[in-house]
Amino acid sequence: MTKRYALRDDQWEQIKDLLPGRIGAVGVTAKDNRLFVEGVLYRYRSGIPWRDLPERFGDFRVVHTRFSRWAKTGVWQRVFEVLSHDSDNEYAMLDSTIVRAHQHSAGEKKSGDWT
């Protein structure tokens, strides 16, 4: 069975050398940076809480801790800056489940509002 990734191989090639934990970098070498990044993308695309992250991505507590560390050190900012240059707007859409209106915005016009 072929693995399906959220990131294309060319996108992964653009960012893999920006990530901590890679082979040859200072510090601990990560087991699988791509799996971790895919887990984070899966979580955000599906909108699930961290605790519902599938086991194939590892312990959700470890994934969340690592995600938070990368966020604090600017890793995600650098990754998105690189990937945004290759944007095709595939995921630029509005979904009615995320668009909210004020409770009074759809109300009926009051008398005297007619011009």
Image (spheres, rainbow, N blue to C red):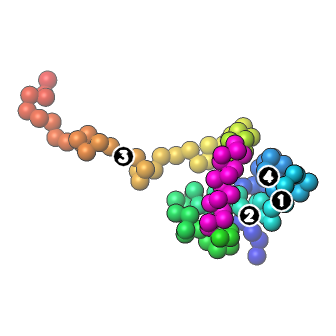
Dot placed on the residue nearer the N-terminal end, 4 or 1: 4
Residue 72 is one of the magenta-drawn residues: yes
Specify few, some or many for label 4: CA neighbours under 10 Å numbering under 14, 14-19, or 20 or more: some
Q: Nearer the viewer, mark 1 or mark 2?
A: 1
Residue type at mark 2 is Leu
* Quarter that holds the N terminus: bottom right
Residue type at mark 1 is Val
Q: Secondary structure at mark 4?
A: loop
Q: Nearer the viewer, mark 4 or mark 2?
A: 4
Looking at the magenta stretch, what is its main secondary structure?
Answer: helix
The magenta-colored residue range is 60-75
Q: CA distance from mark 1 to mark 2?
A: 16 Å
Q: Nearer the viewer, mark 4 or mark 1?
A: 1
Residue 10 visible somewhere in the drawing? no
**Residue underneath mark 4:** 20
Q: What percent of the width, then of the height, locates residue 59?
A: 65, 70
Q: Is residue 64 left or right of residue 26?
A: left
Q: Residue most toward the left?
A: 111
Dot placed on the residue nearer the N-terminal end, 1 or 2: 1
Q: CA distance from mark 4 to mark 1?
A: 9 Å
Q: Is residue 30 left or right of residue 59?
A: right
Quadrant of the rendered structure where residue 110 is?
Answer: top left
Q: What percent of the width, then of the height, locates residue 9?
A: 79, 55
Residue type at mark 4 is Pro
**Residue underneath mark 1:** 28
Dot placed on the residue nearer the N-terminal end, 3 or 2: 2
Residue at 43% from the left image edge and 50% from the top image edge: 98
Dot placed on the residue nearer the N-terminal end, 1 or 3: 1
Q: Nearer the viewer, mark 3 or mark 4?
A: 4
